[in-house]
Amino acid sequence: MAFTVNDFSDLLRLLAEHPRWQTELRNLLLHDDFLALPQIVRELADAQRRTEQRVEELAEAQRRTEQRVEELADAQRRTEQRVEELADAQRRTEQRVEELAQAQRALGQAFGQLQNSFGATVEEEAESVLQWVLEGKGYRLLQEPFTLALNGEVDVVMELQDAAGSNLWAVLEAKARLSRRQVMGWAQQIRSSGWQQRLTAQGVTGPYLVYTLAFGSIPARFRKQRIKASD
């Protein structure tokens, strides 16, 4: 007997009236894999959500990493800038040190020139004053005064002749400051035989008129002793 449309309609009505029949008919008609498909779809949906969540976490981690890299790059730039500032400061310090060294050298040269100038001025003044004093005492200058270096400088040396026609030598030490100890030391030095031998070797044979002359805040003053050769 043929299955008609009316029979199909009756079947649908009966299945609607009996849900358990629907389940039995579905189990009969469908394969187990097909029946498991809804569960598989749900699991895939859950896996997709977890994947999307993991991707979002990775993206957030990537953003944090990029931010940290940018912070490190900024710190590196600041470090390089600081190093350059320190290098500039070092160059300025070295330049300042060089300027100070040049100023020190210039000051040393100026001081040396001042010493030389002062020394020359003292010797020239001492020579003029000594010549004036000796001529006032009746001594006659036989040659131009000169300076003698003998392991210690004799600032002024003059060959003289007194009123009786006797030859003698005036030797003078000039100082910006002069103490009594320096005067006595100068006199003892001239009295020593070794010193007189060195003078004689230079043609300064004695007897000697020994003078000291001090230049300071008070007028120049003489101290004089007469010492014979080998005295």
Image (spheres, rainbow, N blue to C red):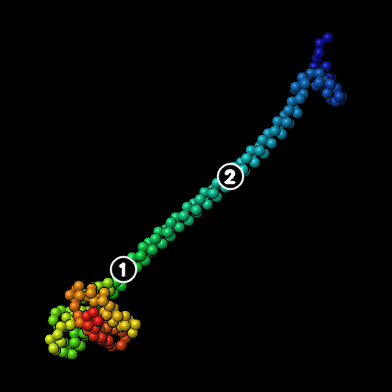
Tell me: 32 left or right of 166. right
> Nearer the viewer's eye, disc 2 or disc 1?
1
Residue annotated with mark 1: 106
Viewer-proximal residue among 151 and 178: 151
- Image quadrant holding the N terminus, namely top right
Residue that carries the numbered disc 2 in the rendered image: 65
User: Could you classify mark 2 by the number of other residues whose Cα lies within 10 Å: few (under 14), some (14-19), or many (20 or more)?
Assistant: few
Q: Quadrant of residue 28?
A: top right
Of pointers 2 and 1, the one earlier in the residue sequence: 2
* Residue farthest toward the bottom in the current orientation of the protein: 137
- In percent of the image, x 23 and y 79: which residue is there? 230
The circle on residue 11 is none
Residues at discs 2 and 1 in contact (Cβ within 8 Å): no
The percent position of residue 14, horizontal first and vertical second, equals 86, 22
Whether 89 is drawn above or below 208: the answer is above
Q: Where residue 86 sits: x, y (%)?
A: 45, 57
Quadrant of the image containing the C terminus: bottom left
Q: Gap in Å between the C-alphas at discs 2 and 1?
A: 61 Å
User: Where is residue 131 shown, x and y percent of the image?
Assistant: 18, 85
Helix, strand, or loop for circle 1?
helix
Where 197 falls versus 93 (above or below)? Answer: below
**Residue under the image location 71 percent in, 34 percent down:** 46
Residue 136 percent location from the top left of the image? 17, 90
Three-letter amino acid code at disc 2? Thr
Q: Quadrant of residue 4?
A: top right
